[in-house]
Image (cartoon, helix red, strand yellow):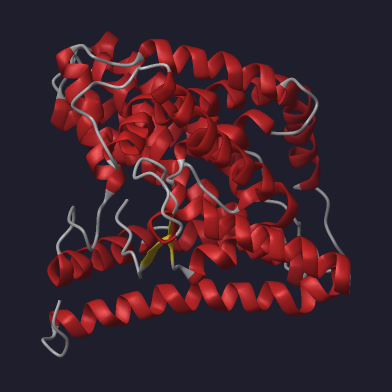
Amino acid sequence: MAHIIPGVVDLGSVLHLPEWINLTIALSLMVFGMGLITGRNGLIVLAGGMLSYYIITPVVKALGWIPADVQGSAISGYVYGTMTRPLGIGMLLGGSIAGLILSLPVIAVAMKSLAQASRVRDKNGSSEELPVYYLIGGAILAFALLLITAYRLGGLGLGRSLLTAVVGVAWIFIASLLVAMSTGMTDWSPVSGLSLVSVMILLYLTHKNVLLTILMGATVGVAISGAADMMQDLKTGHMVGAIPSRQQKVELLTAWLGPIIALTVVGLIWNAYGIGNDKVPAPQAMALKSMVDAVLGGNVPVDKFIAGGLLGFVLSLSGIPGLGVLVGLSMYLPMLYIIPYGIGCIVNEIAKRKKGYEFIVEKVLPFAAGLMVGEAAMTLLFAVLTVAGVLQP
């Protein structure tokens, strides 16, 4: 994922801290607004980020686990790229699996309730939920598309294509639950991390066919991104009293617009600034390249994935809902964004205690939404003006 950094402040240099202590903060009102919306749940993400960057990194350095040629500010990036990030991805997976196991009875009840709710009509004859066969039909369609892609475009055998399609649909289901849970609790959506894992799985299933893997991985990524988007829409709709079935129908009818708009925006940013540089770092794209190179070279950090998965699984069984996912998310995200996000969460909690919950709903949440939309709109506007030659990149 590419994100234009609006500006950063290196508090480490201001406070004369060692170079390897990463205390750089993104001056992003959008990220701050996300924290304002999230509140208390996001404080776990802030605590996990502090653990990752300011406890684990110094311990790793003190134990001498860092190569001699990695010095200065590169130490923090090395620990993040080779240790805490893989552990975080593993924790996301372990936490999601634990959450899935714990939620199986609830999911079964929810599916049954969904089927029943679709048959309940209001006085106007409308149902608040879409019939469950929409879900079943979508799963069958996804399976068919993945099967055709693997068999016809990838040249895989029928058995391997069937296995790839089954695993792809199952992963979409699990990952969609995870991103919906993360988005609902924190407004952060770990789509890119889950997409990285899907790419790793697909590389093995497709006999390391990189082009086919990227194509199918992008398909899975778009699918689970839709889950995060629909969660946000349904949350907003619940706040304003919308009818879920009507929202879901609009989502189904207009889902095709998202990829077109997203590709257009990426194209504008690419033409205006380029991607993969200091202005638009695109860390997830670099992570994807590293993942592909690691699998092709046989250097996948399986031990860290497993260790993180076990830790995330145990944390999610602790009784605190989604703890493994939240801590894994904090270890996966760059500290550049965790700090302003955490500040927003703290401001939310202070305002709630001082002014009450109604003040948060009526004043803080609309203000935070405006911050998020405003920064995104200004970024797009600057990109358009740059492409048009009005502004210099």
**x and y percent of residue 43 in the render?**
68, 48
Please tell me which residue is depicted at 80% across the width and 38% down the height of the picture.
Answer: 113
Please tell me which residue is depicted at 70% across the width and 59% down the height of the picture.
Answer: 346
Work out whether residue 75 can be spotted: yes
Q: On screen, 259 above or below 285?
A: below
Q: Nearer the viewer, residue 184 or 354?
A: 354
Compared across the picture, whether 136 is left or right of 210 comes to right
**x and y percent of residue 270 in the render?**
17, 64
Compared across the picture, whether 290 is left or right of 222 comes to left
**x and y percent of residue 33 in the render?**
58, 67
Q: On screen, 204 above or below 333?
A: above
**x and y percent of residue 186 in the render?**
63, 50
Q: Give the number of callouts.
A: 0
The answer to which quarter of the image holds residue 315 is top right
Q: Nearer the viewer, residue 330 or 101?
A: 330
Could you tell me which quadrant the C terminus lies in?
bottom left
Q: On screen, 237 above or below 67?
A: below
Work out whether residue 248 can be spotted: no
Q: Nearer the viewer, residue 260 or 186?
A: 186
Please tell me which residue is depicted at 66% across the width and 49% down the height of the picture.
Answer: 42
